[in-house]
Image: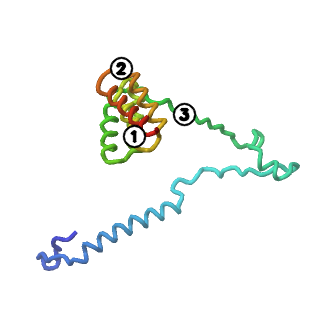
Amino acid sequence: MGGEWDCRASGRKAPAPKWLGRLGAVAAVGLGLGWGLAARGQRLNPPERAAPVIAPMANAPRQAAAAQPPGPASGVAVMAFRQERAAPPPPDPIIAGHDLRVGVFYYIRHDWVGALSRFQDAIYNDPHAPEAYCRAGDSEWKLKHALRAQDDWQRCLKVAGEGKWANHARKALAKQKRSQS
């Protein structure tokens, strides 16, 4: 909308009024909402036959009939739904690396809960990554979960053996002991 109007009678172009652009946008939104509301109220695909009505049995009390599911004699098909949980995805070290990077991003921005969640995902995807355990322990420590932090740091020591993250875990455990005494 906007631009120029073509005056068919004279054949010359005239500038379009400013209100036309706004009016066109409002009309398009109004038509869209109107169509959506009208479609909701109407049945676009009506059923070929009416749904069966479940009525209480004539010789049974009302409470008992309402509590029991309809039987095969009522003409209503009884469907049993089983809710099965999907199996968790298999561990993937590539995803673990991504989770570690995102967890560090959250940790730097002081979002300890988000960071901890990503570090736990990284631990699931690569249980042999000492960095994930150490960083999860650091996040737990920031959230004032001292026992969980201690567990994470001790797991880091078991996984790392020696190296940068093992030293980090030893220092964190020593710091925790000093703060508790």
Q: Are marks 1 and 2 in contact (CB under 8 Å)?
A: no
- N-terminal label among 1 and 2: 1
Name the residue nearer the viewer: 161 or 38: 161
Label 3: few (<14), some (14–19) or many (≥20) C-alpha neighbours in 10 Å: few
Q: CA distance from mark 1 to mark 2?
A: 21 Å
Residue situated furthest front in the rendering: 181
Q: In the structure shown, which secondary structural element does the residue marked by tag 3 occupy?
A: loop
Q: Which residue is mark 1?
A: 139
**Colour scheme of this structure image?**
rainbow
Circle 2 residue:
161
Tag 2: Cα neighbours inside 10 Å, few (<14), some, or many (≥20)? Answer: few
Residue at the extreme top: 161
Would you identify the image quadrant in which residue 179 lies?
top left
Q: Nearer the viewer, mark 2 or mark 3?
A: 2
Image location of residue 78, percent across then percent down: 69, 40
Residue type, label 3: Arg
Q: Residue at the location (37% across, 41% down)? A: 115
Nearest to N terminus: mark 2 or mark 3? 3
> Disc 1 residue type?
Ser
Q: Is residue 2 above or below residue 42?
A: below
